[in-house]
Amino acid sequence: MKYRIGVDIGGTSVKLGAVDAEYNVVEKLRFPTGRDCTSEQIINGIIENCKILIEKYPIEAIGIGSAGRVDPVNGKVLVAGNLPFVDEPVTLKVGKALSLPCYIDNDGNCAIIGEKTAGACKGCNDVLIITIGTGIGGAILINDRVVRGHNNRAGELGHFVIDMGGLECECGLHGCFEQYASATSLIEHTAEAAEKHPESIIAKESASGIDGSTAFRSAKLGCPVAKQLLDEYGKWLAVGINSLVNIFQPEMIVLSGGIANEGENLLSLIRPYLRPEANVTVTKLKGNGGIIGASLLGTPHGA
Ligand SMILES: [Zn+2]
């Protein structure tokens, strides 16, 4: 059996895996990244970790998904917020070092390629994926093709405005969807609520640190403050999703990212506010969607 390597370059770590012909990640490795790393360190890290997998499996190609602006035709990461890449010819360096075909695409596009081939929207031709994390990313699939825009920058599903004159966004607009519906926003509201209601369950749960799951955990323990905060969060998320449904009328919208691990607890928050035709679900591939999708670049699935 032939295997392919999928590499998922994120703002805090690089995950890579050997993927078999049935889209299973048979072995997974990871190493940390960040603003302190040089691009050389990250690329060498990818090469060294790929070598570990190449020794064990008959690898035929390597696919890389990266955060930031990617030029898949020329194999470059042009710029990426939390990463040191500037006009970096990643596929040239990795492919040459390992003597294997190497492909690259944006991480959102890799996620949707993974989901439509092996995940929650298998068999669907018109799908959106919304990745909820530090910000909100995403990708658009229409007629089974990834929509790229003329400059490969389409699919910025976190950056349409849902509150004109609202919170300033680093993209230069005000009131973007991600300012209200990202994990960062939920974490900020959790911290505010904990401070405002020091006797609440959410305050106690926040004492040892806050992440995207703190409010969900507190609500499960019966905290009314957390329940109200999550209801508000669900409303913002649904507002954005409803607009996307009106524009694209997708068969399905797949939510991914850390918050999507909440599964039905997340879906039940947004359901009361969704348009009737909105078919929203969560990723089935958990943390592996980006790796599986990247591994399919350079195949008919990866177009
Ligand atoms: Zn924005």
Image: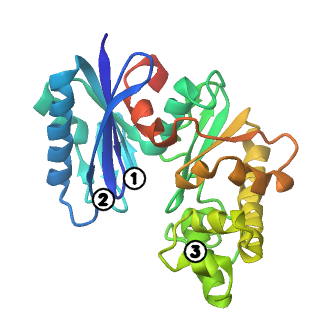
Residue linked to disc 1: 68
Amino acid type indicated by mark 2 = Leu
Residue linked to disc 3: 205
24 or 11: nearer the viewer: 24
**Disc 3 to disc 1, C-alpha distance:** 34 Å
Residue extending furthest right? 276
Count up the numbered dots. 3
Give how far across and how far down residue 299 sits, in percent.
Answer: 40, 19
Q: Nearer the viewer, mark 3 or mark 2?
A: 3
Figure quadrant of the N terminus: top left
Residue 83 is labelled as 2
- Badge 3 or badge 2: first in the primary sequence: 2
Residue 2 is labelled as none
CB at disc 1 and ligand 1 closer than 8 Å: no
Quadrant assignment, res 139: top right
Per the image, label 1 sits on a secondary structure element best described as loop
